[in-house]
Image (cartoon, rainbow, N blue to C red):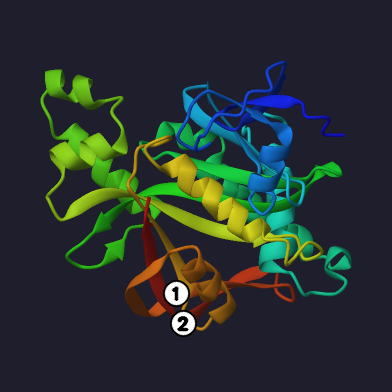
Amino acid sequence: KLNNKSFYFSTSKLYQCRSTTLPTLSLFSAPRTFVPLSYLVNLLAFQKVKQQVLKKKNGHLFSSSLYADDSISISHLDNTEPGSIQKASDFMTDNFWLPNEDGKHENKNYETLSASVHDDLLDRYGERMKQGKLDSGILQAHTIGNPSELAGLVGIDVAVLDSQRNVIFNREKSDSLLTNAVASLGPKDRKRYMRSSAQKIATKLLPPELSAVVVLSNLAVSTSLRRMRIGAKLCTEAELFASVKGWGFTEIYLKVESENVPAKTLYERLGYEERWVENNAIALRADLDSGEFIEKIKDTTVMSKFL
């Protein structure tokens, strides 16, 4: 059905036009060009056709992308939508913490574990997180054929990095460092920094070895939708969200257990490089028998990627 029709190529959207002119061009360098649809089909046959929309909502940058190659859409989880955090916590419990547990929904301890996950997500990504100085968000993936069901999730958090000690502080410690730095100022300066970003506070008020960084966390994909590159797409979208097009960071970090070879391989393919290893770090495991999260000692690899 090409019929020699032409389409207008602008950023990432294609619009049908009347012109049939085909100039010599590079599609990705020319902002406005008329080209036949057949030219676009041949050029983009083995590339992702991606629509990227960035918009402001409630003071935060939201993103929504459509990947045409396998019909996966990715959007920012709206924490003001009723039940959104609960839906995310149920998904995390099933596919991140208890992916291989048979009969888990019939176990009386399942609800206890799910409630713990819900409280953690609510503190980090729900309405409560607005009380602190650290931005955070969740990106969610859906299949076009079943948009009501989650296909994957990934968290994005701002934290404080100590480059001398090679430590990324947890949310509580990071928020405390930033809050105390502002509280130590006089009334006039304190008011000036009260609504400043974590990046600005860290740069202006913290010692030079301390900086604000963005961290990827809790990447989870539905056990029934593996090997569809959903995890890779979530990571790519998180990088865009964290970059100068979003929060303004130039590097993104993540932590992965050193013995988790498949996950490390995925991140390496995406361009992440090892920065350091945290020996004998604490890792959590969900225990369905006790209904509790158990601490395990595991070496953890810290990786990062320049955006």
Looking at the rendered structure, the secondary structure element under dot 1 is strand
Residue visible at 53% across and 51% down in the picture: 236
| Whole-percent x, y for residue 1 in the image | 87, 34
Q: Residues within 10 Å of mark 1 (few under 14, many from 20)?
A: some
Residue 169, percent across and down?
33, 58
Please name the residue that numbered disc 1 is placed on. Answer: 282
Q: Residue at x 73, y 50 (%)?
A: 69
The CA span between labels 2 and 1 is 5 Å
Horizontal side, residue 184 vs residue 117: left or right:
left
Residue drawn at 77 percent across, 75 percent down:
100
| Residue 259, above or below 197 | below
Residue type, numbered disc 1: Ile
Location of residue 242 in the rendering, given as x and y in whole percent from the top left corner: 43, 43
Q: Residue at coordinates 58% horizontally, 48% vertically from top-left?
A: 121
Q: Is residue 161 left or right of residue 132?
A: left
Pointer 2: what residue?
A: 297
Residue 45 vertical placement versus 64 (above, below): below
Query: Is 132 situated above or below 232?
Result: above
Left or right: 257, with 68 as reference point = left
Q: Nearer the viewer, residue 287 or 215?
A: 215
What is the x, y in percent for residue 27?
53, 36
From the viewer's side, name the closer residue of 47 and 202: 47
The reply to whether the C-beta atoms of the residues labelled 2 and 1 are less than 8 Å apart is: yes
Secondary element at tag 2:
strand
The answer to whether residue 127 of the structure is visible from this angle is yes
Q: Which residue occupies the foreground of this view, 70 or 218? A: 70
Q: Residues within 10 Å of mark 2 (few under 14, many from 20)?
A: few
